[in-house]
Image (cartoon, grey):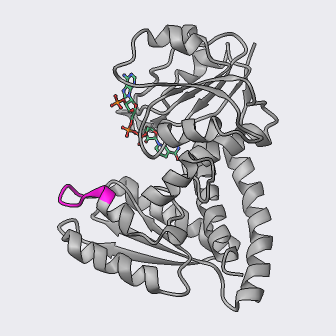
Amino acid sequence: MTARLLDGKALAEQIKRELAERVRDLTARLGRPPGLAAVLVGDNPASQVYVRNKRKACSEIGLASWLHELPANISQEALLRLIDMLNRQADVDGILIQLPLPRQIDVLTVMRAVEPRKDVDGFGPENLGLLALGQPRYCPCTPLGVQQLLVRNGIDIEGRHVVILGRSNIVGKPLALMLMQKAPGANATVTICHSQSRNLPELCRQADILIAAMGQARFVQADWVRSGAVVVDVGINRLPDGKLCGDVDFEAVRERASAITPVPGGVGPMTIAMLLQNTVSSAASLL
Ligand code: NDP
């Protein structure tokens, strides 16, 4: 069996076309375009690329965007002052704080400072709490991208066993919460694994849908995957030759899986599309 490719790039383009129509309508009704303010601290090259790509996607669908670049040695107080200003800026619907942040800054304090309506990354305690309570407002963009990629490719999640490798606050944990929701496009039985889990290969073989979000290059081997399982690779790792690869040994696993995401071109573009979607939803909530 050679797996069907779950093409996140093409799907993200389709979602952006759908969003562009909503943006035209919202711009007319609000008298301004929906807007996203990006905050970039320091000069991490990967973060610079991510923020550039997010702003480019904003302009493709007619969203306004702003970039606030701060030096790596910025104090937490100065960053909080900027967030406070953005919270009060009326034409800003979404605030994106690009992670990682430098050591002197406490991520949770920063996430708590973002006004929940503008927390379009869905990382703040109010939005994560609402998700845990089964009343999601904004779901974190990467998990939402994974769910949309499955749903819009007609992959049934309900009642299936999903095994997630990784329990971070931005991917694994919210993804588990989302897929276990009592809701269409969810209702899965979820197992979450991490660095202390025993017998990973055995746990992975139980998955109908296996989702890798560890940040470990080509870690998941073909014999960890049940024949016919769906495999989603969230990982983005840079190899010594400069090329990108996921957490899954793609060439070997695609011979066992029924469907698989490529890296790049899988979950990455979906993450950006979901950030745009959350920003549009934030603006729409004003009407
Ligand atoms: P983190 O480093 O925050 O979390 C990694 C998780 O994987 C942790 O829970 C860790 O366990 C677990 N883990 C690490 N090594 C192993 C191992 N050998 N066996 C089992 N579990 C392990 O990473 P993120 O969640 O932020 O990101 C994960 C990956 O996804 C990265 O490659 C990142 O670049 C990528 N990413 C991609 C995005 C996209 O848009 N496609 C967006 C965000 C991230 P423990 O908790 O015990 O430490």
| Residue depicted at 62% across the width and 47% down the height | 134
| Residue depicted at 66% across the width and 89% down the height | 32
* Residue 92 vertical position relative to residue 73 in the rendered view, above or below: below
* Residue 17 vertical position relative to residue 87 in the rendered view, above or below: above
Q: Is residue 169 part of the magenta span, yes or no? A: no
Q: Quadrant of the N terminus?
A: top right
Q: Nearer the viewer, residue 277 or 188?
A: 188
Q: Quadrant of the C terminus?
A: bottom right
Regarding residue 7, the answer to whether it shows in the image is no
Q: Nearer the viewer, residue 110 or 256?
A: 110
- Residue 286 rendering spot, x and y as whole percentages: 66, 80
- Determine the image quadrant of residue 229: top right
Magenta span covers which residues?
Answer: 102-108
Regarding residue 109, the answer to whether it shows in the image is yes
Q: Nearer the viewer, residue 49 or 154?
A: 154
Give the tally of numbered discs.
Answer: 0
| Residue depicted at 22% across the width and 65% down the height | 72
Magenta: predominant secondary structure element? loop
Q: Is residue 45 left or right of residue 231?
A: left
- Residue 79 rendering spot, x and y as whole percentages: 28, 73
Q: Which residue in the rendered view is the most extreme toward the front?
A: 133
Q: Quadrant of ligand 1?
A: top left
Q: Which residue in the rendered view is the most extreme toward the bottom?
A: 31
Q: Is residue 109 left or right of residue 276?
A: left
- Residue 243 rendering spot, x and y as whole percentages: 45, 37
- Determine the image quadrant of residue 276: bottom right
* Residue 87 vertical position relative to residue 155 in the rendered view, above or below: below
Q: Is residue 106 part of the magenta span, yes or no? A: yes
- Residue 261 rendering spot, x and y as whole percentages: 64, 33
Q: Is residue 179 left or right of residue 217?
A: right
| Residue depicted at 50% across the width and 65% down the height | 119
